[in-house]
Image: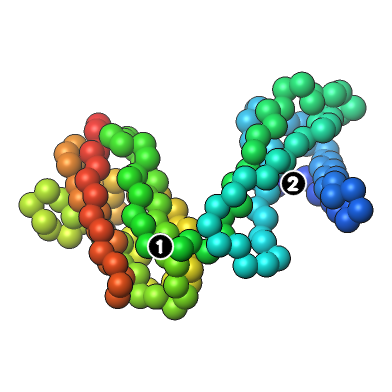
Amino acid sequence: LSDEFSNFNMNYFLNKETHKLIIAIAGADIMKNGGEVLKLNFTANRDIRGNHAEALEVTKFLANETDFTQNVNSESIEFIGKPTVYKLEQNYPNPFNPSTVISYKIPDDNVGVTLVIYNIQGKKIKTLVNGKQNAGVYKITWNATNDYGERVSTGIYIYRLITEKYTSTKKMIVLK
């Protein structure tokens, strides 16, 4: 549940025959703002290599007995299994202010991973990741601060992903 619903209770029921998930959220507080109500994370129950899309459909959305189903956009979701290759993605958004997301893929388990931000002169600005990681797709948010928590200046920055088997470098732009 989003922060706005932290005082609410949630119950759910999964019907394995119809493959329907029913979620009920209730609370005494008044919903103040629109936006994200609930975020669902699914874990595959088998090893999935590569990516494929499956249909996810919201068939009914009720709030205080009012039907808001027509306001919900049903979308395809992407099931992301173990990646088959190492890959460092271009950050998004780019240029950015105040933060950006850096994504990368690791196909092997127990891999030493380092993700570091450098300024254009090659001076280390921030270490985002430094440790062992298992296979997966990772997303790290950088808020344009250095290792001391200070905001960096407008300019071009370099980010580098380093593992035992793979190294990649990309550029990004901080705007103020």
Q: Which mark is residue 7?
A: 2
Q: Is residue 150 visible?
A: no
Q: Is residue 162 visible?
A: yes
Q: Nearer the viewer, residue 135 or 153?
A: 135
Kindly state the secondary structure of the residue where label 2 is placed. Answer: loop
Kindly state the secondary structure of the residue where label 1 is placed. Answer: loop
Q: Quadrant of the C terminus?
A: top left
The answer to whether residue 44 is above or below residue 15 is: below
Q: Earlier in the sequence, mark 2 or mark 1?
A: 2
* Dot 2 crowding, Cα within 10 Å, few <14, some 14–19, many 20+: few
The answer to whether residue 106 is above or below residue 118 is: below
Tag 1 residue: 85
Give the residue type that dot 2 points to: Asn
User: Where does residue 30 sit, x and y in percent of width and height?
Assistant: 76, 31
User: Where does residue 164 sit, x and y in percent of width and height?
Assistant: 30, 75
The answer to whether residue 132 is above or below residue 91 is: below
Using residue 8 as the reference point, say whether residue 65 is left or right of it. right
**Front disc: 2 or 1:** 1
Gap between marks 2 and 1, in whole Å?
42 Å
- Residue at the limit of the structure toward the left, as seen here: 121
Q: Residue at x 68, y 28 (%)?
A: 73
